[in-house]
């Protein structure tokens, strides 16, 4: 038998992975056990996640680990936030969970804000207003048979953990993404939930990251071959929360960008940052491991590239992502820019034509060539990162001099260089597997092998390498490019405030 390992299930918007985490007392290593696609399904009633398929892939990966003779010490699951499954009184799933890009949440925002004011919702939850939030998805479901039948709401990693253990709990870091958790108490904001006419009965007890959720049910034992006593740990189940655990930060002057389908740009603080300035900036206060607060903003991220590639594939063929980045790097600089967080870019569809329309609407040249359009995406993302960092500095009154980029986007050297140059700050790229590392680190904490966040981050520094990107060249042209972007963004501030 091999040494015992902790299995991290890390689910992203395009794919899921099972990884084996091994800790020898001095270093932590993760290796991929299985990778599987995560494809949403468009049905007549909307866009859904294939959560049953995800559970089957997880069970198959765990069975593969067992068949290989791996001694699985524990299991942890992290995923994206906001999306959920509804269970009836028998604990059975009521339909496939809606995908946050389904679009119906946007139509419910006005209705929700009529029931509870914007200031009250923000002061209570501290969460960025986005149409994808669980709050707006639930308001959109008001009056439906699904919501009337539902007795329990479980976010995606909580739902998968429930099927493994039979324990219905809401892990705190992911629960905070709902915009229904009280930012001060860490429990459900029941008066607000009631005022929004959402059934309070739906919300299960909140569990802090680092707790043991439970051991395997009989059906999970049969599906995986693992012992019934195998624990499932409630890790920091929002993937960004797991990733931030593994960011090797040394001081409060560091920011992070968890870069993938979404880009989460933020800082770590000990308490929520609220008030009019934070609300005006539409910053979010999500819970982190160890009672920390992730003060951040969601930026559209590499979703834009992913959707462009899907559109080009429908037209015939498209290069892989590495080649797309090469094409963008070879395109002329100082082309068109756009705000990547425009609402029309949120849902699936013809992304290239939408971006071209945005550029045309602002009087810029048409990025008709693929390479020019891709460069516009990457430069616009880097500009939006700086815009968020400037907001964070203004709201907190603290300087940010270093940016840690983690996740798949940390491998994009072109975007990292753009980020360093446009933001005028040192960029440290890595670790790529931050979410999986953070997942395993919290499992080790649950077994009392690691203590504080500082201990965890010191282990990450010993176990992984980062790549440094310093700002290079004349900063003048980069500053001019950012000012052009800032003018574009600030010209649509009223529209942003309505989101």
Image (tube, helix red, strand yellow):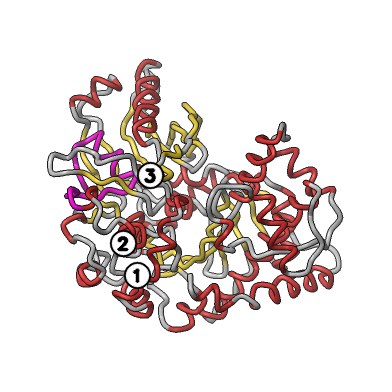
Residue 179's place in the image compared with 456, above or below, is below
SS category of the residue bearing label 3? loop
Mark 1 or mark 2: which comes first in sequence? Answer: 1
- Image quadrant where residue 194 sits: bottom left
Residue highlighted by disc 2: 139
Residue 323's place in the image compared with 355, above or below, is above
Near-viewer residue (212 or 479): 479
The question of residue 159 being in magenta is answered with yes
Q: Which residues are magenta?
A: 148-168
Residue at the extreme left: 89
Q: Is residue 369 left or right of residue 206?
A: right
Q: Quadrant of the N terminus?
A: top left
Q: Position of residue 449 (x, y in %)?
A: 34, 44
Check disc 3: other Cα within 10 Å, few if <14, some if 14-19, many if 20+.
Answer: few
Residue highlighted by disc 3: 45
Residue highlighted by disc 1: 111
Q: Residue at x 60, y 70 (%)?
A: 389
The answer to the question of whether label 1 and label 2 lie on touching residues, with beta carbons closer than 8 A, is yes
Mark 1 or mark 3: which comes first in sequence? Answer: 3
Residue 379's place in the image compared with 467, above or below, is below
Q: Residue at x 75, y 73 (%)?
A: 484
| Separation of residues labelled 2 and 3 (CA atoms) | 16 Å
- Image quadrant where residue 318 sits: top right
Q: Residue at x 35, y 27 (%)?
A: 56
Q: Is residue 469 left or right of residue 186?
A: right
Residue at the extreme bottom: 276
SS category of the residue bearing label 2? helix
Check disc 2: other Cα within 10 Å, few if <14, some if 14-19, many if 20+.
Answer: many
SS category of the residue bearing label 1? helix
Is residue 39 at all visible to an observer of this figure?
yes
Mark 2 or mark 3: which comes first in sequence? Answer: 3
The answer to the question of whether label 2 and label 3 lie on touching residues, with beta carbons closer than 8 A, is no
């Amino acid at each position: 038998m091999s040494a015992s390992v902790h299995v991290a299930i890390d689910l992203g918007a395009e794919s899921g992975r099972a990884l084996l985490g091994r800790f020898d007392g001095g270093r932590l290593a993760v290796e991929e056990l299985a990778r599987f696609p995560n494809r949403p399904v468009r049905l007549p009633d909307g866009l859904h996640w294939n959560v049953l398929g995800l559970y089957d892939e997880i069970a198959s990966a765990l069975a593969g680990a067992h068949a290989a003779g791996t001694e699985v010490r524990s299991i942890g699951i992290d995923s994206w936030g906001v999306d959920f499954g509804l269970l009836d009184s028998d604990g059975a799933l009521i339909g496939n969970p809606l995908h946050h890009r389904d679009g119906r949440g946007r139509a419910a925002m006005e209705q929700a804000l009529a029931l509870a004011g914007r200031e009250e919702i923000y002061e209570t939850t501290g969460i960025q207003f986005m149409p994808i939030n669980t709050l707006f998805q639930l308001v959109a479901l008001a009056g439906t048979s699904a919501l009337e039948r539902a007795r329990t709401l479980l976010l995606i990693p909580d739902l998968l953990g429930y099927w493994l253990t039979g324990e219905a709990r809401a892990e705190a870091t992911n629960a905070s993404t709902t915009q229904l958790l009280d930012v001060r108490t860490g429990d459900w904001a029941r008066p607000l939930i009631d005022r929004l006419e959402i059934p309070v009965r739906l919300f299960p007890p909140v569990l802090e990251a680092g707790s043991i959720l439970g051991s395997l049910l009989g059906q999970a034992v049969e599906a995986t071959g693992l012992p019934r006593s195998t624990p499932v740990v409630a890790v920091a189940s929002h993937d960004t929360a797991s990733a931030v655990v593994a960011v090797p930060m040394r001081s409060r002057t560091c920011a992070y960008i968890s870069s993938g389908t979404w880009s989460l740009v933020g800082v770590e603080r000990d308490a929520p940052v609220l008030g009019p300035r934070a609300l005006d900036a539409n910053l979010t206060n999500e819970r982190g491991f160890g009672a920390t607060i992730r003060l951040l903003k969601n930026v559209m991220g590499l979703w834009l590239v992913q959707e462009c590639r899907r559109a080009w594939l429908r037209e015939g063929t498209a290069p892989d992502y590495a080649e797309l980045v090469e094409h963008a790097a070879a395109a002329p600089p100082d082309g068109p820019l756009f705000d990547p967080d425009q609402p029309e870019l949120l849902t699936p569809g013809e992304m290239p034509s939408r971006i071209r329309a945005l550029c045309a609407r602002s009087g810029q040249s048409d990025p008709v060539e693929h390479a020019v359009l891709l460069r516009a995406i990457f430069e616009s993302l880097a500009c939006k990162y700086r815009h968020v960092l400037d907001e964070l500095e203004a709201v907190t009154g603290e300087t940010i001099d270093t940016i840690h980029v983690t996740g798949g986007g940390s491998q994009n050297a072109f975007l990292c260089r753009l980020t360093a140059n446009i933001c005028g700050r040192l960029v440290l790229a890595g670790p790529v597997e931050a979410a999986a590392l953070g997942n395993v680190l919290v499992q080790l904490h649950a077994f009392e092998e690691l203590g504080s966040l500082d201990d965890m981050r010191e282990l990450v520094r010993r176990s992984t390498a980062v790549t440094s990107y310093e700002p290079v060249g004349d900063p003048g042209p980069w500053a001019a490019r950012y000012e052009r972007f800032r003018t574009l963004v600030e010209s649509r501030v009223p529209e942003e405030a309505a989101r």
